[in-house]
Amino acid sequence: MTTRKRLLLPVTMARTGWDYVQGRDDVEAIAFTPSVPTPEFQALLRDVDGVALTSTPLRAADIEAAPRLRAVGRIGVGYDAVDIPALNRRGIPLMTCGTDNSPTVAEYAMFMMLTLCKRGAAMDALVRQGRWTERYTELPTELLGKTLLIVGFGRIGTRMAKRCLAMEMNVQVYDPYVPAGAVRAAGCTPVADLDAALPHADFVTIHCPKTPETKSMFGAARLARMTSSARLINTARGGLVDEDALYDALAAGKLAGAGIDVFDREPALTDNPLFTLPNVIVSPHMAGNSRESLDRAAVTTARNLLSVLDGEPRREYVVNPEALGAVPGTRS
């Protein structure tokens, strides 16, 4: 008799993913709450072959508590809360959702840019509060002809470029890992020196992972290089922007505005000084989440986990390919 494969899946995973798993007679799906306490999470991990993660961290101790574990999937693309070296020691691949949420993040960054330059919240308040005559006090601005600097030219950054080129913006790209020729082929201008490019940007949008190299990459010194009419958008990861330095720059009028979807601490504390500023728009780490993207990501995650357990891992989704060589029963 064939042993059933057991997957631990978050209750918040979209129905599409659950339906995909439950369509397999040889798979048993077990639900867990993403905020489950560590002892309970480790108890659930003891008897499963694969686990899908949203906001739940996966640390070395969790992996040690899971002797059967052979595959880990992230319903998303970030993985800074997963202990990759611990997975590698066990030969367990970590798989993400590839491009499933990149259109949504690009749209959200565009939404933040438009909301800031069109003064969306302020205009809405003027009408609701009967202050119609104040509509010329501070005029909206345009994206037309403005210079956008994209930091990170991966799945999301490339999509962002397409959307902003269509808005007739001048698009520059800083990404030391992407050849200049590839940037030019996309209709954009490559820049090799981030600090030199910042004074010329009307908008800066961040689309790079959080690594030791990128942590706090936008601190006081770098923010000071931006102009007083510039706006900064971060839909990537908390910790890439120094929040205290950003507040100081915005409050002093050294930056025109910011759109922030991700924070150093999440959930963000309500007394965050940034929330007191009228030239800041914020959201609760939702840029990559839409009905469509979550449906896509749920199916991708389910397929990813089962591909490993079936012995044919979908290598294009694997974050740590070095682990595949140690996975029993997989085809290289």
Image (cartoon, rainbow, N blue to C red):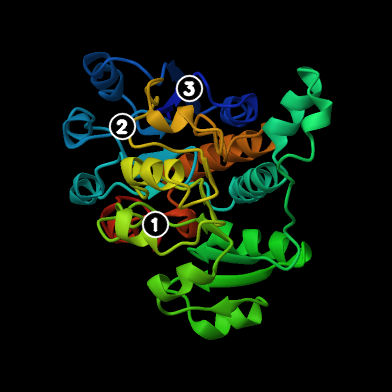
Mark 2 and mark 1: Cα distance apart in space: 31 Å
Q: Dot 3 corresponds to which residue?
A: 29
Q: Secondary structure at mark 2?
A: loop
Quarter of the picture containing the N terminus is top left
> Which residue is located at x 49 percent, y 41 percent?
76
Q: Are marks 2 and 1 in contact (CB under 8 Å)?
A: no
The residue that appears at 70% across and 42% down in the rendered structure is: 138
The residue identified by callout 2 is: 57
Identify the residue under disc 1: 223
Q: Pointer 1: residues within 10 angstroms few (<14), some, or many (20+)?
A: many
Is 119 in front, or is 74?
119
Q: Which structural element holds mark 1?
A: helix
Q: Position of residue 96 (x, y in %)?
A: 46, 47
- Circle 3 residues within 10 Å: few <14, some 14–19, many ≥20: some
Relative to 93, is 269 above or below? above
Foreground pick, 149 / 267: 149
Residue 60 percent location from the top left of the image: 18, 37
Q: In this rendering, is residue 115 above or below 271?
A: below
Q: Nearer the viewer, mark 3 or mark 1?
A: 1
Q: Position of residue 147 (x, y in %)?
A: 62, 68
The answer for how far apart the CA atoms under marks 3 and 1 are is: 47 Å
Judging depth in this view, the residue of 143 and 283 nearest the camera is 143
Residue 176 in view in this figure = no
Quadrant containing the C terminus is bottom left
Of label 2 and label 3, which has the lower sequence position?
Answer: 3
Label 3 secondary element: strand
Task: Name the residue type under label 3.
Answer: Ala
